[in-house]
Image: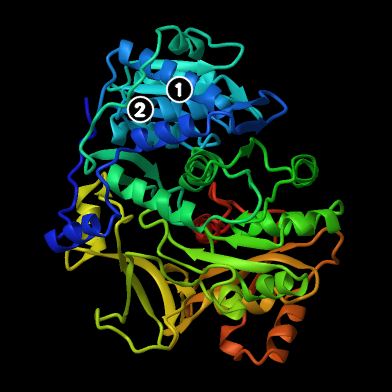
Amino acid sequence: MGLDWQPRAVPADLASGYRREGFWTGESLGALLGERLAAASTQTFKLRSDLRPWSGSFGDVLDGSRRVAAGLAGVGVGAGDVVAFQLPNWVEAAVLFYGAALLGAVVVPIVHFYGAKEVRYILDRSGARVLVTADAFRGIDYLSTLDALVGDMAAVERVYVVGDDSGRWTPFSALLESGQVDSPVAVDDSSAALVAWTSGTTADPKGVVHSHRSFVAEARQLASARSGPPTLIGAPVGHAIGLLGGLIVPVLDGCPVQLIDTWDPGAVLAAMVEDKVSAATGATFFLTSLLDHPDFGPEHLELMRVAAMGGAPVPRAVADRVSGMGMSMIRMYGSTEHPSTTGSTNGVDPPDKGMYTDGRPLPGVEVRLVDEAGVDVAPGDAGEILSRGPDLFEGYTDSALTEATFVDGSWYASGDVGVIDEDGYLTITDRKKDIIIRGGENVSAAEIEELLLRMGGVAEVAVVAAPDVRLGEHACAFVRLAPGAPTLELDAVRSHLSAAGLSRQKWPEELRLVPDFPRTASGKVQKFVLRQQLRAGA
């Protein structure tokens, strides 16, 4: 059973241009990864974990991947069949992903901390024939929910479990006992390679279908931008960011793969020194958690001279902090749908552009900003970001959603709001859904957040719309304080915003202090959860 979806039609002139310019090479994801693993067979492949640490080489992982491919083929999995996995950053996730790719199967990564409701939703809509999961991890007992979960899924034929106790399910080791598949299966590069599920700053996850041509183009785009020492990746490989940064980009570059299965800033800092790796990558949450830790010292700063930020907006206050420490910054903007839309390059772009903008459109990518009527805006004016390029996804698993998201058949409407300056650099200024409509006036959540982050003791802030009987909506500020910081009152927040010159009608009318935020796997705050809490009166 293959993935039941309707890909969008890429205009012929764009498709021919992407092939002519070498973005679409006809290469499958499995062929590319297999070739690169073999080419750097002695390179280090290391996974840090208290439960299942592993260290070996690219060659070792390729051997295991070929065995997994043979095991899957032996139970009837072939090109176009859907294989899902829900695993932490363990070696089994790597060999399962590479092995399924070698077969031309459609891979469905699932973030390891998703519960039964989310996993059921994803399996149901992807039509997965095979599920590979763990027995337990960090208090999650996967076996206790498997019976009911799989019983509801008519398409799921086989379940394999990684761990000491597989219950009534087949141990993952059984996939390693059927010989090897030595050559990748040939597939059409326009066919589906991967379905990434948006973990969502909005409520409903979406199945984002990437073809071999779009995902290979994306992988090459990121690999060409990588620089500096190897990077320790803590983002889960069940999420597109962790998958690309942890299992794909370093393989394409022939650099060591370094993964950790639990983001513990102290453990990450110790690993940096031991293995001489950086960890300054991804959403700002990952970076600031290291900078704020008491173990952070000059030896870490030396390994983090360049911060590669992506996956979430970068507040100017964070950029100022990084600059003040003598670090430079590379920023990239994208989404699961269009992963690498814009970016900056260290040493090529002016430093202020790298620090304070989200870069220019990457090779092959086009960007437009439009107003509410769909008309292009002038440089310096804010508008919704539309983009297209060789790494743009092929469509959602829901064809109606695909149709609603594309403008003029080829432009992806992101829902993000930005400004392009006279030099062509994009800066993300807001998210359409984050705008608070107070008494008919639009209030930018990002503008308030930026100012609040400059208050002493404020580590992180999210401003969202709260229901208001009189005004419709008002701003509520959720704040996470830095360790040891004194408590914060709403009057102090308003005084700070007044001193900063922010008009009174934009000031938050509620303040809630929180120990942490609900987050996506990439570290972004799930604002929809905060809005739901407010609507429920919680």
Q: Please report the residue visible at 64 percent of the width from the left and 47 percent of the height from the top.
A: 230
Which quarter of the figure has residue 373?
Answer: bottom left
Is 332 displayed left or right of 325 in the figure? left
Of the residues under marks 2 and 1, which one precedes in the sequence?
1
Quadrant for the N terminus, please: top left
Q: Is residue 211 visible?
A: no
Considering only vertical position in the picture, is 419 above or below 264?
A: below
User: What x and y, as percent, mark residue 78?
Assistant: 26, 22
Q: Are marks 2 and 1 in contact (CB under 8 Å)?
A: yes
Residue 409 found in image quarter: bottom left
Q: Residue at x 75, y 76 (%)?
A: 455
| Mark 2: amino acid | Leu
Front residue of 287 and 331: 331
Q: Give the labeled residue for mark 2.
A: 102
Question: Could you tell me the amino acid type at mark 1?
Answer: Ser
Q: Which is more toward the observer, 170 or 435?
A: 170
Q: Residue 95 location, x and y as percent? A: 48, 25
Q: Is residue 272 above or below residue 337?
A: above
The secondary structure type at the circle numbered 2 is: helix
* Residue 183 seen in the figure: yes
Query: Going 72% across and 78% down the picture, which residue do you hit?
Result: 493
Residue at the spot of label 1: 65
Which residue is painted at 33% across and 23% down in the image? 183
Could you tell me residue 46's position as x and y percent?
Answer: 64, 32
436 or 44, which lies in front? 44
Direction from residue 464 to residue 50 in the image, left or right = right
